[in-house]
Image: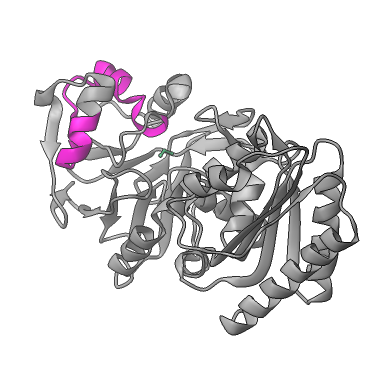
């Protein structure tokens, strides 16, 4: 990625990963990603804000060279995950006098993950400042966006906040700043759903923590920068609120078609009830899409057949993710068909211990759905509609 100027003496020097398609061997990246790194040249000192994934370190070093940077005084490390910290050892090799500035928790992680020696660090706490001469950095501890050690950096003179993963998006784009907010909204929501949603209340606290800062630019560590901070901060306020929408998500899988018929009947009836319903075939669906749909929805109905005396293993994977992502859903239920028996419901209930959702009586039937079974599915849809109305979800 080319060097790009953000403000006087503040440059973007990171890398775009156009072709990466999976993160953590788990999270799909349909639009690639970027590892944003920034150099701030003060009148006396220079600071590098985070680095890049180790695969892109040559690009970062070439960008610094292109800018004529012969001396860096500080690396500000916001977060120890290797897509931002993994280049630190190479930068230390090239600029041996550099000190790594971070908080005590992040320092411990960096020492453990990257074997950086203790004498390379300068520790900073919440609210501490660091002068670069004509620019002053303030450090803001913002835990659980999405690791416990994350911090942010605010430059008073330029009114820029560097937020690492917070407000980021996995989006490889040539645009330095967010140009198309409608499309960025989707990428940012997907990113929030995949990594921030499990820590929704702490994320909300961190939003409150920075609300009184005069911010003109938000510079995250993935995706484009925001020169309209209100857009992304309002979106985060909505996603982290306790409000849910009149939506039902139906992740399902079917082996011989019986569960699928039940899903179709449920979806039809929910639509008749005026509910926005989205069925997701578990094996065909990108889990990022599933996570994103969980951000707002009020109810999840899992559709699974019984196999090997329990829920289908693919359905168990979806339930495990649902539990780990901790969406703010209010209601949950299960539909499905079995051949001769099993403990599908008990198995699912034993997994969803993180969820604060009311279990609406499931509809688990034997064999092919008969007329009474269809009626039971339709009655479940009516109950969901009733529950939504009673809870004031419209
Ligand atoms: Fe982009 Fe949590 O690292």
Q: Residue furthest front?
A: 340
The number of callouts visible is 0
In the image shown, does 326 or 304 lie closer to the viewer? 304
- Rendering quarter of residue 205: bottom left
Residue 130 shown left or right of residue 230 in the figure: left
Residue 145 shown left or right of residue 172 in the figure: left
Q: Could you tell me residue 73's position as x and y percent? A: 19, 33
Q: Inspect this view and state whether residue 13 appears.
A: yes
The quarter of the rendered structure image containing the N terminus is: top right
In the image shown, does 55 or 304 lie closer to the viewer? 304
Q: Could you tell me residue 193's position as x and y percent? A: 53, 52
Q: Is residue 376 magenta?
A: no
Q: Residue furthest right?
A: 371
Q: Could you tell me residue 299's position as x and y percent? A: 62, 64
The structure residue drawn at horizontal position 27% and vertical position 61%, both measured from the top left corner, is 157
- Rendering quarter of residue 258: top right
How are the colours assigned in the image?
Answer: one colour
Q: Is residue 351 above or below residue 20?
A: below
The structure residue drawn at horizontal position 28% and vertical position 17%, both measured from the top left corner, is 94
The structure residue drawn at horizontal position 9% and vertical position 24%, both measured from the top left corner, is 119
Q: Which range is magenta? A: 83-109
Quadrant containing ligand 1: top left
The quarter of the rendered structure image containing the C terminus is: bottom right
Q: Is residue 334 above or below residue 112?
A: below
The structure residue drawn at horizontal position 35% and vertical position 51%, both measured from the top left corner, is 162
Q: Inspect this view and state whether residue 224 appears.
A: no
In the image shown, does 151 or 1 lie closer to the viewer? 151
Q: Is residue 106 magenta?
A: yes
């Amino acid at each position: 990625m080319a060097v790009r100027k953000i403000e006087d003496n503040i440059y973007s020097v990171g890398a775009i990963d156009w072709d990466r398609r999976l993160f953590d061997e788990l999270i799909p990246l349909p639009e690639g990603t970027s590892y944003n790194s920034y150099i701030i040249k003060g009148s006396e000192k220079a600071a590098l804000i985070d680095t890049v994934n180790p695969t892109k370190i040559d690009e970062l070093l070439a960008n610094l060279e292109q800018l004529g940077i012969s001396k860096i005084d500080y690396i500000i490390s916001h977060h120890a995950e290797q897509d931002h910290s993994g280049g630190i050892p190479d930068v230390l090799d090239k600029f041996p006098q550099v000190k790594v500035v971070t908080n005590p928790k992040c320092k411990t992680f960096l020492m453990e993950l990257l074997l950086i020696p203790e004498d390379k660090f300068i520790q900073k706490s919440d609210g501490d400042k660091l002068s670069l001469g004509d620019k002053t950095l303030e450090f803001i501890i913002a835990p659980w966006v999405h690791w416990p050690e994350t911090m942010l950096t605010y430059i008073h003179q330029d009114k820029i906040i560097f937020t690492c993963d917070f407000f980021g998006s996995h989006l490889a784009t040539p645009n330095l700043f967010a140009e198309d907010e409608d499309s960025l909204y989707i990428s940012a929501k997907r990113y929030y759903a995949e990594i921030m949603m499990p820590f929704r209340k702490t994320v909300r606290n961190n939003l409150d923590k920075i609300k009184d800062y005069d911010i003109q630019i938000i510079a995250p560590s993935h995706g484009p920068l925001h020169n309209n901070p209100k857009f992304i901060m309002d979106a985060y306020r909505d996603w982290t609120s306790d409000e849910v929408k009149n939506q039902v998500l139906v992740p399902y899988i079917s082996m011989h078609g019986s569960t699928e018929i039940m899903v179709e009947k449920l979806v039809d009836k929910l639509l008749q009830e005026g509910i926005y319903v989205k069925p997701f075939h578990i094996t065909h669906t990108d889990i990022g899409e599933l996570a994103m749909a969980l951000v707002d929805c009020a109810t999840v109905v899992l559709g699974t057949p019984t196999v090997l005396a329990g829920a289908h293993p693919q359905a168990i994977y979806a339930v495990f993710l649902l539990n780990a992502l901790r969406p703010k859903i209010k209601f949950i239920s299960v539909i499905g068909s079995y051949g001769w028996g099993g403990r599908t419901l008990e198995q699912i209930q034993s997994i969803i211990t993180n969820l604060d959702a009311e279990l609406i009586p499931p509809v688990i039937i034997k064999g092919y759905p008969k007329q009474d079974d269809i009626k039971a599915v339709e009655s479940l849809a009516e109950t969901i509609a009733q529950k939504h109305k009673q809870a004031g979800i419209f």
